[in-house]
Amino acid sequence: RTVYVNGEYLPETEATVSIFDRGFLMADGVYEVTSVLDGKLIDFDGHLARLERSLTELDMDKPDQFDELLEIHRELVRLNGIEEGMIYLQVTRGAPGDRDFAFPDAETTRPTLVLFTQNKPGLADSPAAKTGIKVIAIDDIRWGRRDIKTVQLLYPSMGKMMAKKAGCDDAWMVEDGFVTEGTSNNAYIVKGGRIITRQLSNDILHGITRAAVLRFAREAQMEVEERPFTIEEAQEADEAFVTSASTFVFPVIEVDGVTLGDGTPGPVARRLREIYLDESRKSAV
Ligand code: PLP
C-alpha cells in the first residue's frame, strides 16, 4: 500500500513519524475518515470543513499541504486502486525536539500530516446493513469537547470491546441520563415516523453523515426532532439507527438487551440508507 506522509507518497513500510510527535505522546492530533465509493470521495467538502474547524478549536496550524488535500486524497485512491473503502487522514501538532506540555513554537515545529487508504470491497453492501446491529449502554466518561475530532479514542475503543464482550456490536454512551452518541457514530431513534437525534453541541461529534442524512430526511418530508433521548425511550422506539462515514446508515435492532419491534431493520433506517447512498454517490468527487 502507498501512504502519504508530509508531502511524500511512500510504501507503508518506509513511512515514519518521529517518536517525539505530539500525536504519539499526547494524542495532540485530529483526524477525518472519508469513504470511497466507485473510486470517488463521499462528502469530501464536509470532512475538509470539519478538519479545519477541529484545527482552529485546538489552535493548531493547518498542515502546509492543506490546500492540496483533495488532490492528495484522489492520488492515494488512484495509487491504491480503491473502488470501495476509506481514506484516513491525521494531522498532529508535530514533533518538537523534546516532550513538553506547552505547545511548540509554530516557527520551528510544523504539523504532521498522514493519510492512508483502507480497501473495503463491499462497503456499501455490508451484511450489518441488512441484519441491523445490537448496542449496549455505557457511561459516557469522555472529555467535554467531543465536537473536536481528536485521536483520543481510548474510551470509545474500550466501549467497543465492552459491546463485543456482551455479544453486541457497539455501545451507546449515556451522560446525565441521555444518550450522547455511539462509540464512532451518531445515534437516532424513530417514533411514529419522527426521527429523533440529539442536537449539536460540544457533547457530540458533528457528524458529516448526520448532516447529510437529516437534510435528505427533511427533503423527503420526514419529521426530524433534534433533542436528547434516553435508553428507555430508545427501547420503546419503533426503530433506531446510527450514521457514520464508514457505515453510512446502520439499523439498530437491539438496545441494551431489548429487541426493537420484530428485531429486523426498520423502514425509516432502510429508506435513509438508500437515499444517502444514492445521493452521496451522485455528489461524490
Ligand atoms: N460520533 C463519533 C464519536 C464518531 O467517532 C463518528 C465518526 O467517526 C461519528 C459520530 C460520525 O461522524 P461522521 O458521520 O462524520 O463519520
Image: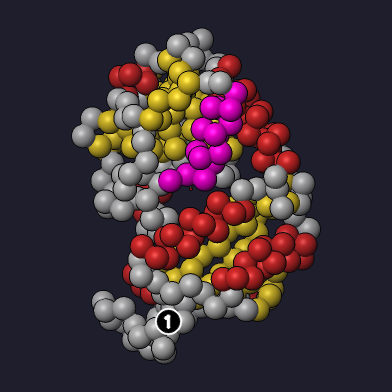
Q: Can you see residue 245?
A: yes
Q: Report the magenta stretch's main SS.
A: helix
The colour scheme is secondary structure
The amino acid marked with disc number 1 is Ala
Q: Which of 106 and 76 is in front in this view?
A: 106
Q: Is residue 64 left or right of residue 224?
A: right
Residue 78: name its quadrant: bottom right
Asked if ligand 1 lies within 8 A of label 1, the reply is no
User: Residue 58: horizontal and vertical position, in percent?
Assistant: 35, 66
| 73 versus 98 height, above or below | above
Q: Among all residues in the image, which is located at the extreme left? A: 176
Q: Is residue 280 magenta?
A: no
User: Residue 266: horizontal and vertical position, in percent?
Assistant: 55, 17
Residue ID at (42%, 65%)? 55
Q: In this view, does 82 lie to the left or right of 273?
A: right
Q: Does the magenta stretch include residue 219?
A: yes
The image shows a total of numbered marks equal to 1
Residue 113: name its quadrant: bottom right
Q: Which of 12 and 80 is in front in this view?
A: 80
Q: Can you see residue 165?
A: no
Magenta region: 206-220
Residue ID at (65%, 48%)? 42
Q: What element carries label 1?
A: loop
Q: Mark 1 points at which residue?
A: 95
User: Residue 93: horizontal and vertical position, in percent?
Assistant: 41, 74
User: Residue 129: horizontal and vertical position, in percent?
Assistant: 61, 29
Residue ID at (59%, 75%)? 65
| 26 versus 261 height, above or below | below
Residue ID at (70%, 48%)? 284
